[in-house]
Image (cartoon, rainbow, N blue to C red):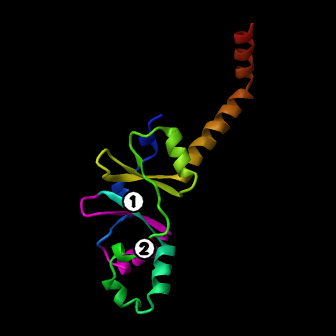
Amino acid sequence: MNIAFFLTPKSQVVHEKVTASMRRAMERMEYHRYTAIPLVDEKGRYVGTLTEGDILWKLKNDTDINLKNSEKVLIKEIPRHVQNKAVSINSNIENLILTAKSQNFVPVVDDSNIFIGIIKRSDIISYCYERIFNENKYKTSPHYQILENVANN
């Protein structure tokens, strides 16, 4: 299966450049109620993920920062504690699932490491649930039992 099936394109993903301000990132995360967002450099390459925890640790460790002057702090100055791994758009489904096991979303990049979107873990789980549910439902139907008997005789 092609992982592009699960892709939420970049145009529909809240992401931020590392040259944006801490305040901008906080306001966008608050508005959309996200706890983490993908980060890109000036060329659009995926460089990491910013989390609420990263912002909180920055505020804790730099007591001179307040909401007003957080406008002067760039995202690239905020240490990141979680390294969300990206996958290539050419990755296989197994690699995607292994990566999604420990991340709420998986950033997807092209061959030049350009960020092209994300795959949400919830979308993968929903797909798997539907596949399991539909397969089990089909197997309990009388039609399946008839076909099973014909195939075995």
How packed mark 1 is, by other alpha carbons closer than 10 Å (few <14, some 14-19, many 20 or more), is: few
Q: Which is nearer the eye, 135 or 3?
A: 3
* Residue at the image point whose x is 36% and y is 91% from the top: 68
Image position of 153 (left or right of 2)? right
The quarter of the picture where residue 153 lies is: top right
Query: Which element type, helix, strand or loop, lies under badge 1?
Result: loop
Q: Which is nearer the eye, 101 or 77?
A: 77
Image position of 71 (left or right of 121)? left
Height in image: 66 above or below 17? below
Residue 42 magenta = yes
Identify which amino acid the numbered label 1 is placed on.
Val
Q: Position of residue 147 (x, y in %)?
A: 70, 15
Numbered range of the magenta stretch: 20-44
* Residue at the image point whose x is 50% and y is 69% from the top: 35
Q: Which residue is mark 1?
A: 13
Q: Earlier in the sequence, mark 2 or mark 1?
A: 1
Q: Which residue is mark 2?
A: 79
Height in image: 16 above or below 55? above
The quarter of the picture where residue 151 lies is: top right
Query: Which element type, helix, strand or loop, lies under badge 2?
Result: loop
Image position of 100 (left or right of 13)? right
